[in-house]
Amino acid sequence: MRTADELLSCLEIRREVFIRGQGVPENEEMDGRDDDCIHFLAVAETNGAARPAGTVRLRIVGGRLAKLERLAVHGWARRQGIGSALLRAVEAESRNRGHGEVVLGAQVSSIPFYERCGYAAEGDVFHDAGIPHRLMRRRLDD
């Protein structure tokens, strides 16, 4: 992501998917960490025009560990490989920065998607914004 307008597009996708779509409280979704993250924006063509379609952020949490957060794709853009492309972009950036693994908190309903992408679930279910999640991890040197 390069511009303030692109960041606004990322935030609007998150508002649509998480706040309006899943009922996540705005103060939990907009957690004050965006300035400390690297944001990715996917754009897709629909009706002959390019539109913001999906977003994810990467937060460095220490050492060789990177955390993938806030992966969201507009409903009209799902099942087109956008989520997977965003995931791979985060992994590539993490590798370039020397990180050895990526972790994320996956909504339980999304675990099969992440497993197909090489992530493994671990630990017990926990709730984030009232939604059941599990920790998932992928080593990048695989």
Image (cartoon, rainbow, N blue to C red):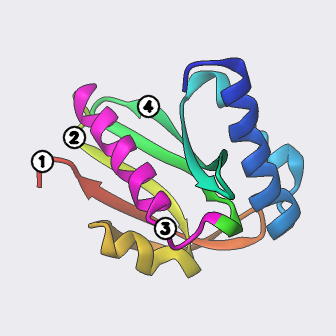
x 52%, y 66%: residue: 106
Q: Report how far apart the C-alphas of labels 4 and 1 lie in the structure.
A: 17 Å
At mark 3, the secondary structure is loop
- Residue 80 placed where, x, y %? 49, 67
Q: Report how far apart the C-alphas of labels 2 and 3 lie in the structure.
A: 28 Å
Q: Is residue 111 left or right of residue 131?
A: left
Q: How many marks?
A: 4
Q: Report how far apart the C-alphas of labels 4 and 2 lie in the structure.
A: 11 Å
Q: Are marks 1 and 2 in contact (CB under 8 Å)?
A: yes
Image: magenta residue range: 77-97
Q: Quadrant of the N terminus?
A: top right
Q: Is residue 138 above or below residue 93?
A: below
- On the question of residue 32 being in view, the answer is no
Q: Are marks 4 and 2 in contact (CB under 8 Å)?
A: no
- Return the disc, 4 or 1, that comes first in the chain's sequence: 4
Q: Which residue is mark 4?
A: 60
Q: What label sits on residue 80 in the rendered view?
A: 3
- Return the disc, 2 or 3, that comes first in the chain's sequence: 3
At mark 1, the secondary structure is loop
Crowding at dot 4, Cα within 10 Å, few <14 / some 14-19 / many 20+, comes out as some
Q: Which residue is mark 1?
A: 141
- Residue 60 placed where, x, y %? 44, 31
Q: Is residue 13 above or below residue 109?
A: above
Q: Is residue 71 left or right of residue 12?
A: left
Q: Which residue is mark 2?
A: 100
Q: Nearer the viewer, residue 1 or 61?
A: 1
